[in-house]
Image (tube, grey):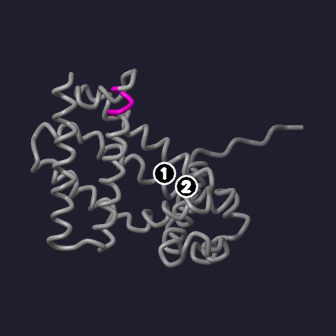
Amino acid sequence: MQPPAALAPGRAAYLERRRIATRAAILVAARRIFADASYADAKIDDIIRAAGVSRATFYSYFASKLELACAIYDEIAPETAALFARLPGQLRQGKGAVRQWLTDFVGMHLEHRYVTPLIAQLQLFESGFRARILKDTEALIDLVAKSGDPAFARAAGEGDDARRQRMRVRLLFNQAAGVCAGIARGEMQGADADICLDIISSDMLDLWNEGRSGQ
């Protein structure tokens, strides 16, 4: 039996472009469906119709609704990592730079406003997703800890002091994420939003200064 002939380079490139476009169409449709309905209520049939693909095509790209939702979450992971990689440098520049960093965090939530409620719902309805969020938070702490800044490097050390510092960083990151998401959703506006960002930026600088003084 003869092995199948290899695809011509032009044909292979066309099929790859089509594959990428089809996957992108499914993700666009899913983002729209998840924005209009809760994760639990969103149906794969609705996503298939919105994407204009067959059920067989859908399952050739994603094994489940959870895998599809995780792919949407994965799309913003590099942007989140890049944002947090900037944080030590912003802290060194002072409160105005930290406020700008928080404003950029709000902007990221606004740009990806469909992801924040999706992440919250995934943690409720998919038991393994909460563990992933915790793991990703630890990865962000490790990212800033490797920046060379002593305040964050302490969070990557050993012993009770390091564990305490790591917990403080984790709580502060969670608080910043919650506040920025709330502002993006319109739960805090005007003066209230400004006060919240001022408090968070002051807390970040306090933690950073305490960490450096304890080196």
**Residue 115 place in picture, x, y as percent:** 44, 63
The stretch of residues the image draws in magenta is: 161-165
Type of residue at label 2?
Answer: Cys
Relative to 207, does residue 147 appear above or below in the rendering? above
Mark on residue 70?
2
The answer to whether the residues at label 2 and label 1 have Cβ atoms under 8 Å apart is: yes
Left or right, residue 84 beside residue 41: left
Q: Is residue 164 magenta?
A: yes
In which quadrant of the rendered image does the C terminus lie?
top left
- Crowdedness near tag 2: few (<14), some (14–19) or many (≥20) residues, C-alpha within 10 Å: some
Q: Is residue 7 above or below residue 27?
A: above
Tag 1 residue: 74
- Seen as rendered, the residue at the extreme front is 160
Q: Amino acid at mark 1?
A: Asp
- The residue at 43%/68% (across/down) is 114
Magenta span: predominant SS is: helix
Q: Nearer the viewer, residue 164 or 71?
A: 164
> Percent position (x, y) of residue 99?
16, 53
Secondary element at tag 2:
helix
Residue 205 location in percent, x, y? 17, 42
Residue 155's disc number: none
Q: Quadrant of residue 146?
A: top left
- SS for tag 1? helix
